């Protein structure tokens, strides 16, 4: 405990780090306050709004990323997700369109890409806001609408306010990245997800006491122990790498009369076991939500029963199809973001090589083969992490607390926390303090979400 207190003192004694942490906390508090401000034309005291437990399926994911603001009809209801969607689109465009890829190699080009991302964010937000208006007019929220507010004015004001709210959240994320600590956009998403955690813990504890009596506390402690083990497993999945040895060619340094031969240095290429991050789970969840759209277009009881069987999150078929899709999307997304040919060309330009492998095409094939091999266990473990919340619900854990047993929530949370701690540790080491760990250093993850900041989009 004393060492932990000493670490906190060291962190607080660094003026720049202290200012960044305070600045980040203030902006996060501003974001959380905005999540409770309802839209114009919505009665915040309405029973329909307060009793809503939040949507399910794909909308449930959006509500989770928005920290519950979606179900509360807040001015930040769409959160930062339109910005993330636009950033993913620009990231994929850089892979498919050579002109965009060329822009991202230069500083001025990255600024242009970032500007295009903002313009695209406005368009995406306006489209999603229009769909959100239709959602608010559904029977679930219809009673919360103010009768005196005309439908057209409600539609227009909601689109304008939601667009402004998303742009403001985007601005908060950029400011946290520039003047705070951690990646601002990822941090805002993580705060929204973890905001549900205290309520979920209390709800689970109350549930166990009510159903199992005196043994409820013991069962609850067992669940907490399993929860900690799951977090450790997710950390291993996030940080797991396969190191490819790398040598640098011998170099001659100095003038002709005083030439000095420097032996080649040794290094390694760290290939992530899970390069795709959390994106395969998000894609798979979105795809699993599609069958529910077609339920209303058929009157066949057999077809409706089939759709229900593959959309039941606790059913065998749902989890089996979901796991297969996570594995498939992991390979797909890894192939999009990972370019072994570019890595091989960079090694050749820097006079470095993999021992026993010829430079050029052979190096590219060698790296691609290793990446294919390590992606399989990474994809399988990612699929297991994706279905763990469903397994937890089957074992009697409440749905709120079960959502933290892996899945999107904890993968994003673990990745963002690791990145933030890595930045804190860098400040400590730069100021000649010990790091946060006794041995080794904290490693960040490649990405749990596409990292987005004021300087552009990075994988």
Image: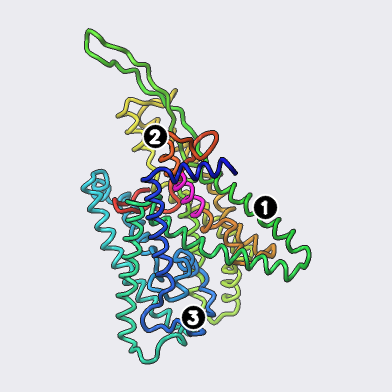
Q: Position of residue 173 (x, y in %)?
A: 36, 58
Q: Position of residue 73 (x, y in %)?
A: 43, 76
Judged left or right of residue 403, residue 245 is: left
Q: CA distance from mark 3 to mark 2?
A: 55 Å
Mark on residue 364?
A: 2
Please, what secondary structure does the residue beneath circle 3 have?
helix
Q: Earlier in the sequence, mark 3 or mark 2?
A: 3
User: Would you say residue 100 is visible in this rendering?
Assistant: yes
Q: Which residue, given by chain and number where applicable, does mark 1 sit on?
A: 225
Judged left or right of residue 122, residue 387 is: right
Q: Is residue 344 above or below residue 189?
A: above
**Cβ atoms under marks 3 and 2 closer than 8 Å:** no
Q: Which residue, given by chain and number where applicable, does mark 3 sit on?
A: 49
Crowd tier of the residue under label 2, counting other residues whose Cα lies within 10 Å: few below 14, some 14–19, many 20 or above: some
Q: Earlier in the sequence, mark 1 or mark 2?
A: 1
Residue 212 magenta:
no
Q: Position of residue 276 (x, y in %)?
A: 45, 49
Magenta part of the protein: which range?
412-421
Task: Check the image and name the residue furthest to the right.
Answer: 214
Q: Earlier in the sequence, mark 1 or mark 3?
A: 3
């Amino acid at each position: 405990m004393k060492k932990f207190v000493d670490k906190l003192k060291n962190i607080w004694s660094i003026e720049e780090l202290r200012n960044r942490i305070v600045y980040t906390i203030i902006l996060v508090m501003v974001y959380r306050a905005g999540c409770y401000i309802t839209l114009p034309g919505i009665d915040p005291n309405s029973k329909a709004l307060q009793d809503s437990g939040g949507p399910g399926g794909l909308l449930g994911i959006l509500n989770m990323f928005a920290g519950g603001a979606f179900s509360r009809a807040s001015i930040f209801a769409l959160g930062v997700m339109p910005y993330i969607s636009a950033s993913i689109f620009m990231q994929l465009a850089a892979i498919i369109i050579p002109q965009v890829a060329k822009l991202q190699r230069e500083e001025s080009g990255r600024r242009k890409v970032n500007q295009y991302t903002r313009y695209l964010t406005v368009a995406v937000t306006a489209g999603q806001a229009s769909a959100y208006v239709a959602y608010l007019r559904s029977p679930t929220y219809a009673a919360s609408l103010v009768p005196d507010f005309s439908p057209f004015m409600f539609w227009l004001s909601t689109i304008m306010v939601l667009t402004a709210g998303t742009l403001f959240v985007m601005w908060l994320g950029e400011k946290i990245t520039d003047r705070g600590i951690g990646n601002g956009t990822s941090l805002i998403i993580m705060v929204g997800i973890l905001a549900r955690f205290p309520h979920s813990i209390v709800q689970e504890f109350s549930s166990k006491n009510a159903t199992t009596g005196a043994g409820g506390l013991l069962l609850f402690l067992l669940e907490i122990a399993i929860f900690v083990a799951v977090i450790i497993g997710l950390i291993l999945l996030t940080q797991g790498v396969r190191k490819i040895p790398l040598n640098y060619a011998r170099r001659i340094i100095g003038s002709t009369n005083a030439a000095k031969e420097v032996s080649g240095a040794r290094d390694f290429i760290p290939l992530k076991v899970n390069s795709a991050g959390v994106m395969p789970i998000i894609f798979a969840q979105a795809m699993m939500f599609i069958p529910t759209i077609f339920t209303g277009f058929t009157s066949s009881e057999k077809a409706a029963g089939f759709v229900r069987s593959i959309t039941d999150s606790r059913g065998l078929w749902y989890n089996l199809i979901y796991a297969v899709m996570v594995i498939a999307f992991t390979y797909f997304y890894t192939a999009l973001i990972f370019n072994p040919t570019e890595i091989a060309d960079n090694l050749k330009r820097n006079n470095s090589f993999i021992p026993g492998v010829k430079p050029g095409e052979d190096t590219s094939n060698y790296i691609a083969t290793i990446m294919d091999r390590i992606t399989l266990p990474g994809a399988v473990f990612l699929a297991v992490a994706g279905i763990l919340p469903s397994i937890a619900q089957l074992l009697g854990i409440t749905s709120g607390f079960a959502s933290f047993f892996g899945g999107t929530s904890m993968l994003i949370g673990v990745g963002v926390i690791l990145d933030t701690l890595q930045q804190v540790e860098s400040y400590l080491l730069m100021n000649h303090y010990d790091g946060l760990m006794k041995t080794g250093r904290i490693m960040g993850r490649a990405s749990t979400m596409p990292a987005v900041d004021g300087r552009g989009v990075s994988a």
